[in-house]
Image: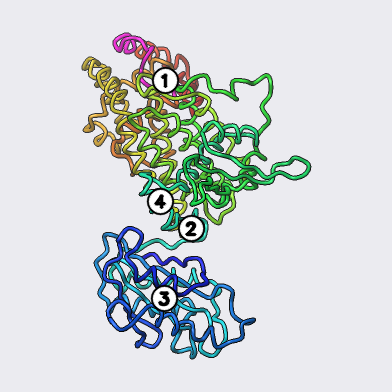
Amino acid sequence: MIPRIQKRGQRTIGLLYYLYGPGKFEEHTDPHLVASWDHNAPDPGRDATATPKQLQQLLDQPVENIDQAQRPKKHVWHLSVRNGGEDRILTDEEWGDVARRMVAAAGIDDPEAGAGCRWAAVRHADDHIHIVATLVREDGYKPDLANDAHRVQAEARTLEAELGLRRLNKGDGTAAKRPTSAERHKAQRQGRERTAREELRETVRRAVTGTRNEAEFLDRLSAAGVLIRTREAPSGDLLGYKVALPDDHNKDGEPVFYPGVRLAPDLSLPRIRERWSADPTPTADAPGRATAANPSAARRRTASAAWTAITVVEHGDDAVAAAHIAAAAEVLDALAKTSAAHTRRELRDAAFAFERASRSHVRAERGHDRALRQAARDLVHGGPALGRGEDGASTAMAIDMLFFLITATMHWHAKKGHAQQAAAARQAAEHLRAAYEETAAQPLGVLYQRGRRLNRPMLQRQTVVLREALPTLAKQILAEPGWYALAATIVEAEAAGHDPAALLSDAVERRELDTADSVSDVLVWRMRRMADLPADGSGMPDIGTLGNAAATNRAESRPSAPGRRRGGEEASGKTR
């Protein structure tokens, strides 16, 4: 149940004509009253002798009874209450009770408190009602509407439970402003999938991703094709900005501009500057950190940054964790922007959903999130990925690490009672899971075939390594199709001089695996990242040659004297 208080108005009759009319798209059917302040108001919808004018005169009577100077300039209060498409259809009696509960919660009319305002509830569709009230009480005083939006939201949560409706999560005031009904209808007329406000919010989010100053931010906005208006001080300093879609106009044919703060709380210029304030200044002798060499390298760095951030979100200070969560949203935006066609939709939806999870009342302490913000910058400058070969495999690795980071974010919000943010993170994780399945199939298939080419003695040796390193998970992993890809990875890691048992133990001990569909797949990406192996196995020698190299490494690592450390242990220390 979604209650929404609309902008206050000046003309009661205008609103009544709309509520009892056909609607802008003939969507109003059978308009009629379901409740009113005195249970006896005229109903122009069901009573042929009643008119909207008569109802308006009765509603406005307390306003007309006080001096002109005391009347509120905008005396019309308007609340819409809408149920979801999956909710059952309420009866008129139930909607009438909802209306009475809502006006009491808002402070419009509470029978137990004495004199109230006059109001009427009109139903012209199955799924919602409109409540119109005039803001002068019967005794001539004005109602106390402080926090009316918060109070009707709280009442909606109670009504959902009582009426058996879908339970929505309680908000905390940090969500982006919802599109208005007029904006939604306009988008439908124009054939847009999203409203102009939503499209601009996504465009601005992507433009700010990984930027370091105002000039770079405005350049990216311009490159994205949106119209920009800036507000500057006499000194020339930027004070604010507005953006508009080139083809979104008002009734006068002028572009409809939105300030950043109206798109989302963290897209105002002061909040964007907080990201830049903690960024290091690029140095001339380190150009490689300003621009990623290629998409694959950028994705590998993203995987490493996400892996490190998981620990911060799980165990770090709240303000630092909040900064990493906000920066994770930038990484998702950058990954969606540069993804291959077959994963672009899921990654875009993941970024769109996670935007809600990136904000809470825990203020982010910027500066600690530099690695993630740099990863986002690298992704943007690294350019689009083709989605196959090494960059396809490195994309799968990055998505896998981000999935666990977003899952950790979901748990972080849930522990703090941030219900909407936790739900948004869960939704983003589902989109990431779908994107991973699209991306990982080909590179895992290549590794699977490499594992299948292992001879029986070599495969048995890797089985022993697995059982010794992960005795509680070995049975499950050996039954998974991904075991062969993991076996090939173990051989490659050992041939590269690492201790695979130590890598396996480290990969499992440092991160949860409960949310993984395939433990072997997760361990493949974790081991390949920790051992710095090619994500898709390219450039590696034949698997038989690797087996010989691995055997040689094992022989050389045997201690020749008491107290000598194994070479594998030294190598594994470098990977931790």
In the rendered structure, which disc, 1 or 3, sits on the residue that comes first in sequence? 3
| Residue placed most toward the observer, 170 or 341 | 341
Q: In the structure shown, which secondary structural element does the residue marked by tag 3 occupy?
A: helix
Could you give the CA–CA distance between mark 2 and mark 3, rounded to whole angstroms? 28 Å
x, y percentage for residue 252?
A: 52, 50
Kind of residue indicated by mark 4: Lys
The disc label shown at residue 102, or none:
3
Q: In the structure shown, which secondary structural element does the residue marked by tag 1 occupy?
A: loop
Q: In the structure shown, which secondary structural element does the residue marked by tag 4 occupy?
A: helix
In the rendered structure, which disc, 1 or 4, sits on the residue that comes first in sequence? 4
At 46% from the left and 57% from the top, the residue drawn is 418
At 23% from the left and 32% from the top, the residue drawn is 480
Kind of residue indicated by mark 2: Lys
Could you give the CA–CA distance between mark 1 and mark 4, rounded to whole angstroms? 51 Å
Q: In this view, does 432 lie to the left or right of 179?
A: left
Q: Give the range drawn in magenta.
A: 531-548
Front label number (4 vs 2): 4
x, y percentage for residue 83?
A: 32, 65
Query: Badge 2 is on which residue?
Result: 416
Could you give the CA–CA distance between mark 4 and mark 2, rounded to whole angstroms? 38 Å
Q: In this view, does 289 lie above or below 405?
A: above
The disc label shown at residue 186, or none:
4
In the rendered structure, which disc, 4 or 2, sits on the residue that comes first in sequence? 4
Could you give the CA–CA distance between mark 1 and mark 2, rounded to whole angstroms? 38 Å
Tell me which corner region of the image, top left, top right, bottom left or bottom right, holds residue 538: top left
Question: Label 3 neighbourhood size at 10 Å, few (<14), some (14-19), many (20+)?
Answer: many
At 48% from the left and 34% from the top, the residue drawn is 334
The verdict on residue 542 being magenta is yes
Question: Label 1 neighbourhood size at 10 Å, few (<14), some (14-19), many (20+)?
Answer: some
In the rendered structure, which disc, 1 or 2, sits on the residue that comes first in sequence? 2
Front label number (1 vs 3): 3
